[in-house]
Image (cartoon, helix red, strand yellow):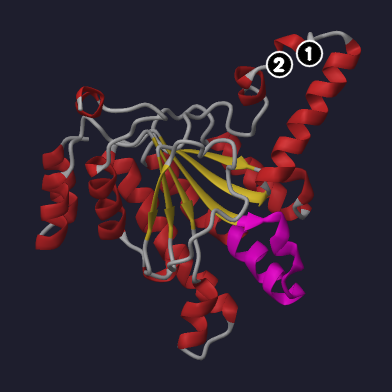
Amino acid sequence: MTRAQVLEVVGDDRDEQTLVAAIDFSRLPRHVAVIMDGNGRWARSRHLPRLEGHRAGVESVRSVVETAARLGLQALTVYAFSTENWKRPTDEVSGLMGLLKLYIRRELKTLRANNIKFGVVGGLDGLPKDVRDELRRGIHETSKLSGLQFSLALNYSGRSELTDVARRLAIEARAGTIDPMDIDEKAIERRLFTAHLPEPDLLIRTSGELRVSNFLLWQIAYAEIWVTDVLWPDFRRRHLLQAIVDFQKRERRYGGITASAGKA
């Protein structure tokens, strides 16, 4: 999408117009990953049950997915449910699973209409059957779409993902299908949940927490991290635009030095 087309979506919001004007559309992050945090605090501050915070957070997901697709990003991955989240109260987990099913049912038509390919990063088989069925329907019905690759990280753990890759490589080495000396970064990357996606260029975390919470540990090795105090249910298009503007102001060196620093 062109800058003019994005500005049409923004409408009369002057702040968002300014942000869109500041974005270099030739240097967009290919893949944005998001740690959605603050739903519980948002609900608590309003004297509401925690589930209401998660319910409000669905609107933020909708806004961010729409904005990412309109900007022309290649991939967006949001951290929806970690393996550690199973420790939460049973009623909260059950409510989250219900919200997940409802989201897929309600949004599938919109995803298809906007050429958004849906996917899951994580242990799909560890989720309840009714949730798996709904997710697989969403994956199947958008599998041939070619726009934004939108993924939910569900039942996901970065450490478990890397442990699983190590186990699979050990089994393959024992079977003789791979030489241990041929195990390199590419061999690991091909076996990650995100093998079909570019590495994240930008990692966003809401609610002001300064940790990565076991999310995409291998993949975010060189990602730029952008943290905001905004709680996830309050996160909207302007916040994503601001994150991209700030991302483009940073100098990405990947462990090297700049030309100007090398001359100094």
Q: Is residue 138 visible?
A: yes
SS class, disc 1: helix
Q: Amino acid at mark 1?
A: Pro
Taking the spot 61% from the left edge, 41% from the top edge, the residue there is 121
Q: Residues within 10 Å of mark 2 (few under 14, many from 20)?
A: few
Taking the spot 65% from the left edge, 44% from the top edge, the residue there is 158
Q: Does 90 appear in magenta?
A: yes
SS class, disc 2: loop
Q: Amino acid at mark 2?
A: Ile
Foreground residue among 99 and 177: 177
Q: Position of residue 20 (x, y in %)?
A: 16, 48
Q: Position of residue 108 (x, y in %)?
A: 49, 48
* Whole-number angstrom distance, CA of label 2 to CA of label 1: 5 Å
Q: Which residue is mark 2?
A: 183
Foreground residue among 235 and 9: 235
Q: Is residue 194 above or below residue 204?
A: above
Taking the spot 34% from the left edge, 42% from the top edge, the residue there is 69
Q: Does 102 appear in magenta?
A: no
User: What type of secondary structure mainly makes up the magenta span?
Assistant: helix
Tags 2 and 1 touching, CB below 8 Å: yes
Q: Is residue 169 above or below residue 203?
A: above
Q: Position of residue 188 (x, y in %)?
A: 66, 24
Part of the protein shown in magenta: 81-100
